[in-house]
Image (cartoon, rainbow, N blue to C red):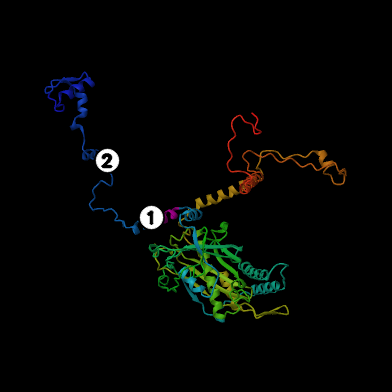
Amino acid sequence: MACRILRAPALARSLCRNFPNPECVPCGETRQTVCLGNLQKRHYNNYKTHGEMAALKTPSDGTLFSEEPEYPEILDMSPEGVALRERQKHYDEVKRMPTAHHKSFILNTERGREEMYYIGDLHYNSLDMYQYATRTTHEMEQPAAETDAQTVDSELVSWIEEAILTSHLTEPQTGESLKFRERNLVRSILDAIRYHYKMADTVVLEEPRIEAFWQHTSFKTNLDETRFEDKENFAPWLQFRGHPQLMISSEIPLEPVIASTSEEIFQAELPIYDYYPEELGMQKKKHRMVSTAGYWCNALQYPLLTLSSMKEVLPSSLDPSIGTDHLNVSERRRRLAAHGLMLNFATAAGSAFSCGFTPFHEVTYPFVAQHVVSDGQNWHFSKYQLDTMAFGPDFSRDKRNFAWSSEEMKLYDSIEDGKLQGLNSSVLSRIVQTVRAPRKTVEDPRPYTDTDVEAEFLARGEKLAKDLAARKFYVSESLDYEIPLWVKIFKMGGEDMPTSPTLKWERPRPKAQHIFQFNKEMYEAEIKGIKERKKRIARDKFFGLRPIWREPRPIGVNPDGRN
């Protein structure tokens, strides 16, 4: 048998010597006895090419040929395109979070979002600035005619008259302002309406927490503080905090005023107010982003109505920078409209965030909010519809939000001789219509959240709070010091206590501290001693009482010089 592999005799001899096998045959070319069993493993005919190995594998979907060609996605590899894909990846990550708490955690832990612009107090042109910051179209409602007012039940009218007269006779206690009377009067009117129409599915919250944050890309920035390449991409984060007195919430959201598919949402005009945020009174602070409407425990309920005090929106003061007595009727109306617009937007945005929507995702249905400013006698009504809160650089800027506000109205003229004079039925009808605004259920109110995970998350938090409260007083394993009975009788007794001056109060021994327990008193004492020691050393060095370097003492020599 001729061997076609071994061309060198030395290689054949080494292989036969290193790999002995009884199945060996003589090789004619090399005239050596070689092992076919070992050589066939190294024959080049036994090696497979890449194509042959691929043919042995099971074909996958990516290796099969199709009748229609499928090309890979063409990606924009420019720096802007890569940055856009990274931002979109972050948006998808936030969207996958199961609850609003997890979404808030992801948003707040992202690097570079510590600084925010807080919207300040009202000023003379706040309405235009608020419209531009929230992309809202505002409309002033015309005064309603007397014939348009709906009739109110006589029983409800008598209840409201009695509530007004009773609150007028009630005087605030010492240390309380007139706000006490106003809040009780408005609360009595709203409670009478809720009780008369049996609105048991609503909840009243006092001094709720209204906060909202969002991103805006249409403000200008200062080139001295921002790099030139970031001028086009300046997108500050805005934060608003509202402090209404009352809020009525419900489990069913309010019915939208304008349909989400209407063309008005994309055709409304906005005022241009793109100045520096610092010039508009916004304060730049380092704080976490918060968005909520009411309390966290009631975050799943939809706000039906919020109420603020008239004297907080229109304060009275001799200082023209604070007081509003010098404002005319139109200026007062614009100030009330600006306050209602901003608070309604924060209420609707906070409610949307609690349902799982973020500034990175468009809302799937409109959120409606109502606000009332009143002192019991004067009333102002405003309404808001949130259609979008995605104002970032990667989203469409065509959608608009809508706001409506009324004029300032008087519920009654005065109270004379214990009788109510001039009760305005149209204003009373407007109050009833606001409280009883139509509501409509939504098929999928929280599409980006998992209700089961959220319920488990809240239940776990409640269980943790209960466990912490139950273990609060068990911080040590040692027993309390027990005072002997004779000490209680002879030393701590009241009338039976002897008058001998030699007897002293026996203070109980301090409780034994656990080895892992943190003792605040010992820690403070140790820190105090270290600070005093450092001060003493620094003082001695300053006055030369203690030299910085001393010559080493010779070995075997005592300090007094004796060996």
Q: Earlier in the sequence, mark 1 or mark 2?
A: 2
Disc 2 residue crowd, few under 14, some 14–19, many 20+, Cα 10 Å: few
Q: Position of residue 48 (x, y in %)?
A: 21, 36
Residue at horizontal 49%, vertical 75%?
139
On the image, which quarter does residue 304 sit in?
bottom right
Nearest the camera: 133 or 513?
513
* Residue drawn at x 70%, y 72% as measured from the top left: 166
Please give the residue where the numbered disc 1 appears in the rendered image.
Answer: 86
Q: Which of 270 and 385 is in front in this view?
A: 270
Name the side, left or right, on which 110 lies relative to 192: left
Q: What is the three-letter code of the residue carrying label 2?
A: Thr
Q: Which amino acid does label 1 sit on?
A: Glu
Q: Which residue lies furthest to the front in this view?
A: 561
Q: Is the magenta stretch mostly helix, strand or loop?
A: helix
Q: Which dot, 1 or 2, sits closer to the camera?
A: 1
Q: From the image, tell me which residue sits under label 2.
A: 58
Residue 119 place in picture, x, y as percent: 52, 67
Question: Quadrant of residue 423 in the image?
Answer: bottom right
Q: Position of residue 294 (x, y in %)?
A: 57, 61
The magenta span reads 85-96
Q: What element carries label 2?
A: loop
- Horizontal relation, residue 159 to residue 8: left or right: right
536 drawn magenta: no
| Residue 438 shows in this picture | no
Residue 329 in percent (x, y) is at 56, 80
Q: Nearer the viewer, residue 554 or 132?
A: 554
User: Going by the image, does 394 lie left or right of 240?
Assistant: left
